[in-house]
Amino acid sequence: MIRILWRIVNIIVLAAVLIIGGSIFVVARTSDQIAATFDSTDYQLSGEEAADLKTIEPECIMVLGASVKSDGTPSSILQDRLDVALSLYKEGIAPKILLTGDNGQVEYNEVNVMRSYMEGKGVPPEDIFLDHAGFSTYESVYRAGYIFEIKKMIVVTQKYHLYRSLYGCESMGIEALGVASDQKSYEDAAGREIREILARDKDMVKWIIKPEPTYLGGAFPINGNGITTH
């Protein structure tokens, strides 16, 4: 009985080491690709940070989706991402914005909420590209390269999520830098961090296998007119 319990303990320890080890690898691999962190609502991009972001000559700023409210407005975590992307766009970091999120149901449409928010802030519709089938971080990054033919871009999301996103870009052959949108403290922050450890491991395996996303389809090159994707 003791031997069986000891084996179970060893298996659990080994599994924990592999899970944590995979997450640590993803973080270590991509941490130097995070070029700026917006840590307050009044944060201003420094000249040095702007110059660093422009060094890769990004074609667009990709904003990864998150939940939206029932009244058709972005959640706090999503609004922070959008506000950072808006700041970068106005700074001239990249000429286009790619909004990617879940529009798998008629009654739930993250990307149109994101588009409305950006247009309300003065971004021209032709500069906004929509990915209605960005059902996960993996699918968003895969489709960014395959559908939108992006080679270089800036990724905007919260820092805990950036590592996995940037790792996906590298695996997809996209040169990317990240900007973290952590202007506020969010509910269940500890839970998000724990779930992200598992998500990093899952996506690391997926990027080895590279299964096709739920939907692919025709190309919408990012250097074209974003209205064609609305």
Image (cartoon, rainbow, N blue to C red):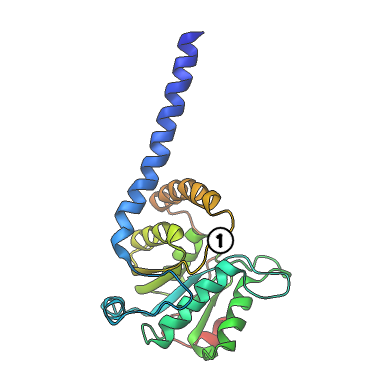
Q: Residue at x 42, y 28 (%)?
A: 13
Q: Residues within 10 Å of mark 1 (few under 14, many from 20)?
A: few
Q: Nearer the viewer, residue 171 or 111?
A: 111
Name the residue at 59% across, 88% down.
Answer: 120
- Disc 1 marks a residue whose amino acid type is Tyr
Find disc 1 in the rendering and name its residue: 186
61 w.r.t. 195: above or below: below
- Up-down relation of residue 47 to residue 5 (above or below): below
Q: On the picture, is 149 further left or further right than 215?
A: left
Image x and y of residue 149, in percent: 40, 74
Q: Nearer the viewer, residue 52 or 143?
A: 52
Q: Quadrant of the C terminus?
A: bottom right
Q: Is residue 206 visible?
A: yes
- Residue 96 seen in the current view: no
Res 228 → quadrant: bottom right
The correct choice, above or below, for 49 with respect to 8 in the image is below
| Residue 100 on image: x %, y % | 53, 71
At x 43%, y 69%, the residue is 39
When asked about the image quadrant of residue 222, the answer is bottom left
How many marks on residues? 1
As displayed, is residue 11 above or below residue 155? above
Which quarter of the figure has residue 152? bottom left
Nearest to the observer: residue 210 or residue 200: 200
Counting from the top left corner in percent of width and height, residue 204 is at: 41, 50
**Residue placed farthest to the top in the image?**
1
Mark 1 element type:
loop
Answer left or right for 144 relative to 78. Answer: left
The x and y percentages for residue 226 are 51, 85
The residue lying at 42 percent from left, 77 percent from top is: 43
